[in-house]
Image: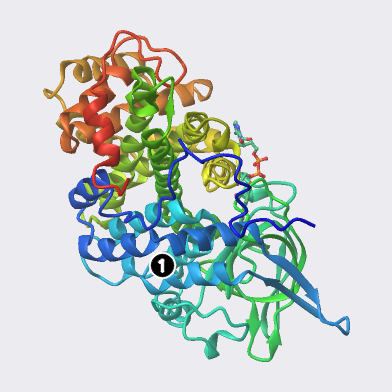
Amino acid sequence: MPQLPPSADLGTHEVTNQPPERGDADLWAGDAALRDHAAAAGANAAHLARYGAEMGTAAMRAAGRDANRHPPEAVLFDAGGRRLDEVAFHPAYHRLMAAGLEAGYAAIAWEGAAGGHATHAAMVYLTTQVEPGVCCPMTMSYAAVPALGADAGLDALWRPKLTARGYDGSIRPLARKAAATMGMAMTEKQGGSDVRANTTRAERDADGWRLTGHKWFCSAPMSDGFLTLAQAPGGLTCFVVPRWLEDGRNAIRIARLKDKLGNRANASAEIEFAGARGRRLGEEGAGVRTIIEMVHHTRLDTAMAPAGLMRAALIEALHWVRHRSAFQRRLIDQPLMRVVLADLALDWEGALALGLRVARAFDGTDAHERAFARLGVALAKFLGNKLCPNLVYEAIEVMGGMGYVEDTALPLLYREAPLNSIWEGSGNVICLDILRTLARTPEAAEAVDAELDAARGRDRRYDAALAAHRARFAAPPEEARARAFAESLATLLTAAVLLGQAPAAVAEGYVATRLDGPRGRVAGSIGQASLDSEAILARLGRGAPF
Ligand SMILES: Cc1cc2nc3c(=O)[nH]c(=O)nc-3n(C[C@H](O)[C@H](O)[C@H](O)COP(=O)(O)OP(=O)(O)OC[C@H]3O[C@@H](n4cnc5c(N)ncnc54)[C@H](O)[C@@H]3O)c2cc1C
């Protein structure tokens, strides 16, 4: 049999016109927009510089791909048929978890330093670019912390381990672990958005509470505990259900892992509580009020994640077009390609800027910022996630056939793109929540209005669009118009943030193409507006090692 040359190069042709490997990419130093908006949000730049450099290394990006290519497996029984109810992960998953948690992904917001939530949110954005699946368990651990405040005893038990700046993936009781993670179990077969339809029962016996029932989606089932909703005699109630008890496994059975479109590094399980022990968190009957503290914080992360996915897709595409030619010209130099990329880049920077502005509100201590966070997070989550899948798809097309091939990061990003919209209030539910907030929390509407007003006078097209929005929605919209309202308000709010802190080419380009006059429904179809593609593309890629 003829031997192949060691390089598997058959000598038939020379490889040309294919981009080089990206190698190490500093995700902080290469991202001017992140640095600007993180500074405006009061985030810890030195910390993010370290984390961004580490996450962008070729080795870390390879770990992200490995964690996806080797998804977790349920290990339900040992060889003797005894129940284990465990999940085995590839070492790359543990490596990424350790990198994030040791750097304070779940902790930094709760350590008391200024800008903690903004720093956390920027870490979500950075981590998402490398491997979005591990963000789920880390985000839930971050977000569980404020909900635990409903019970001093549980807070004392769990908070130090959730915020330990460490990762301990070992399988043993909480007391014997240096660090812990927390999941969230709400969704059941008969209802996800409508958690009041939960049927899992919580009954009290001499030793405390026992839970019986199921959860249809329970991500990160190897978490050390789960904030869980169950029906107690006094109504829907929140419980902390540990995976381990002092004397052995808690009665949480894994039925199977979901075979998901994306988010493949992360395990999402169907579970059964077979009389599992839990401790009540918050008052009996106040389950939604208690767990909403967690949901409010996971929403921040689901608003940041699409910005990270968009960034990852665009930067891959930009690398490609800088090194690929067609018809004797580099793709980056083709006018139509430039306008498509520049148009897409505006949505990415808009999502990034608004997400970090909202994160700053999470750090705020005054009433205005708290009120702004309530509505702002829903608006940012809605708009960023609605734009993300189409942007990733366009980035695939920018790369031609190779964008569709698993050798590039694009298929992973594409599979992930719809997910953050489903989590923590799917699109419609978020829009209805926005209407409810307007009706019940006038101070939230006032805080957003104040932000919109503060941007007036900077661009007459923005002023006109704001006036038109207010005339169109003079009265609160009915449910059927909630998406139109949310899209319009979120777009204006994004423009207001960009006008305050983005370079003119970006802010004016956003206003010209999103607020002023008709445009087509597809990327690059910008109507009569003109974009400063040169400046926008420089912003996208300045400092990136291409
Ligand atoms: C990968 C993955 C991981 C997950 N992990 C977890 C987890 O760890 N823990 C957990 O608790 N859940 C988890 N979920 C579940 C997720 O939170 C739910 O799928 C989500 O909340 C939607 O609930 P549902 O699937 O029951 O859809 P439904 O509630 O049936 O909603 C279906 C659609 O109807 C819309 N809708 C609902 N009400 C209205 C209305 N009044 N008007 C108009 N439209 C409406 C919704 O917006 C949605 O688009 C996970 C889901 C996925 C995909």
Element under label 1? loop
Residue type at mark 1 is Ala
Residue 461: name its quadrant. top left
Res. 69 in view: yes
Q: Residue at x 34, y 21 (%)?
A: 339
Q: Percent position (x, y) of residue 463? A: 19, 18
As drawn, the residue found furthest toward the front would be: 2
**In the image: residue 151, left or right of residue 526:** right
Callout 1 environment at 10 Å: few (<14), some (14 to 19), or many (20+)? many
Residue 257: name its quadrant. bottom right
Q: Residue at x 30, y 49 (%)?
A: 545
Q: Residue at x 16, y 16 (%)?
A: 460
Q: Quadrant of the N terminus?
A: bottom right
Above or below: residue 252 compared with residue 355: below
As drawn, the residue found furthest toward the left would be: 457
**In the image: residue 115, left or right of residue 393:** left
Q: Quadrant of ligand 1?
A: top right
Q: Percent position (x, y) of residue 201? A: 72, 64
Above or below: residue 119 compared with residue 246: above
Q: Quadrant of the C terminus?
A: top left
Q: Percent position (x, y) of residue 381? A: 43, 41
Above or below: residue 123 compared with residue 521: below
**In the image: residue 284, left or right of residue 437:** right
Q: Percent position (x, y) of residue 397? A: 52, 29
Total number of numbered labels?
A: 1
Q: Which residue is mark 1?
A: 106
Q: Nearer the viewer, residue 268 or 49?
A: 49
Q: Residue at x 42, y 55 (%)?
A: 297
Res. 436 in view: no
